Image (cartoon, grey):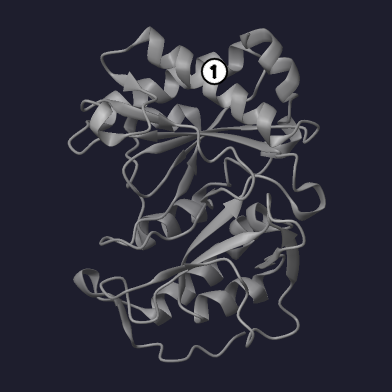
């Protein structure tokens, strides 16, 4: 067990949550979180002085990280011969170490280091404007679910711990990112076309007109999404939480904090524990959608 340095340092001032509390969270969720991190390049979001002070996104592993922390050289697309040395978290010890390095958020690739160009997840990010009711978001998530099921995929849902939901589908990693992104884009376009007053795929905020943005940008080489059971670096210390579809009717995007996630995991298994056992072909789904 890692000895926590400066455990009493306050990381969430409005909630009186300390660095020690953050590390303890990651100790408690390691059993469900590590399987979602294992084998994947990570981007760390670190806040050494807490969430109200400046933090940063870190891709390149720090030189001071110990040798037992797995680091993989990942090629940069479009920059021949250039690499980023990403951390890969395959065990609870690495997770705890990174938390002790003031990592509050863990962002994970949609592909693994052994098949970097072929994602095994598709993610639609439902990004609402301020003031959107949770019930409206739930309805959009269900419509995304139904569309993806209709083209042969197995959709899962996650409360992001922020403002929206992720609808994700496991893939068999036989198709490249360009194809998967096209699939995600066409799916989002169809949803937005069916409900143009409520949904949009416009990249520019000034073009969205108060509508929910169906963000497909995560479906690209080098892009990430918030890992299941990661904390969010915002007041309330909310936690990204995978859900069963039957739970969605009473769920909020920020419905779980440190206390509630602890109670949840004491009584309920991870709804995403078998997500990759239900993988499907993105190429076949694209054929059906097209």
Query: At x 64% / y 52%, what residue is drawn?
Result: 36
Q: Position of residue 234 (x, y in %)?
A: 30, 61
- Judged left or right of residue 276, residue 236 is left
Residue 257 or residue 155, whichever sits in front: 155
Query: At x 51% / y 81%, what residue is drawn?
Result: 100
Image height of 93 relative to 178, above or below: below
Give the image quarter of residue 237: bottom left
Query: At x 41% / y 55%, what residue is drawn?
Result: 239
Q: Position of residue 273 (x, y in %)?
A: 65, 44
**Total numbered labels placed on residues in the image:** 1
The secondary element bearing badge 1 is classed as: helix
Q: Position of residue 23 (x, y in %)?
A: 48, 76
Image height of 90 relative to 199, above or below: below
- Judged left or right of residue 171, residue 252 is left
For the N terminus, the image quarter is: bottom right
Give the image quarter of residue 211: top left
Residue 74 or residue 259, whichever sits in front: 74
Q: Position of residue 88 (x, y in %)?
A: 69, 65
Image height of 67 relative to 282, above or below: below
Residue that numbered label 1 is attached to = 186
């Amino acid at each position: 067990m890692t000895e926590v340095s400066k455990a009493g340092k306050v990381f969430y001032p409005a909630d009186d949550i300390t660095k020690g509390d953050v590390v303890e969270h990651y100790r408690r969720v390691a059993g469900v979180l590590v399987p979602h991190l294992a084998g994947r390049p990570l981007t760390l979001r670190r806040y050494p002085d807490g969430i109200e002070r400046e933090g940063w996104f870190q891709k390149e592993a720090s030189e001071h990280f110990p040798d037992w922390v797995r680091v993989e050289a990942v090629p940069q697309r479009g920059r021949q011969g250039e690499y980023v040395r990403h951390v890969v978290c395959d065990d609870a010890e690495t997770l705890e170490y990174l938390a002790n390095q003031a990592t509050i958020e863990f962002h994970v690739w949609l592909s693994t280091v052994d098949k970097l160009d072929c994602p095994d997840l598709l993610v639609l990010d439902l990004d609402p404007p301020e003031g959107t009711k949770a019930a409206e978001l739930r309805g959009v998530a269900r419509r995304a679910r139904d569309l993806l099921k209709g083209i042969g995929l197995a959709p899962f849902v996650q409360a992001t711990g922020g403002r929206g939901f992720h609808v994700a589908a496991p893939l068999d990693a036989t198709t490249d990112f360009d194809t998967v992104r096209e699939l995600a884009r066409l799916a989002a376009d169809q949803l937005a076309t069916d409900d143009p007053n409520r949904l949009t795929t416009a990249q520019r905020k000034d073009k969205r007109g108060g509508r929910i943005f169906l963000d497909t940008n995560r479906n690209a080489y080098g892009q990430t999404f918030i890992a299941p059971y990661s904390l969010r670096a915002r007041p309330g210390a909310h936690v990204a939480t995978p859900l069963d579809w039957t739970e969605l009717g009473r769920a909020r995007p920020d419905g779980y904090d440190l206390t509630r996630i602890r109670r949840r995991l004491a009584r309920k298994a991870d709804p995403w524990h078998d997500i990759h056992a239900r993988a499907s072909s993105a190429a076949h789904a694209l054929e059906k959608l097209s």
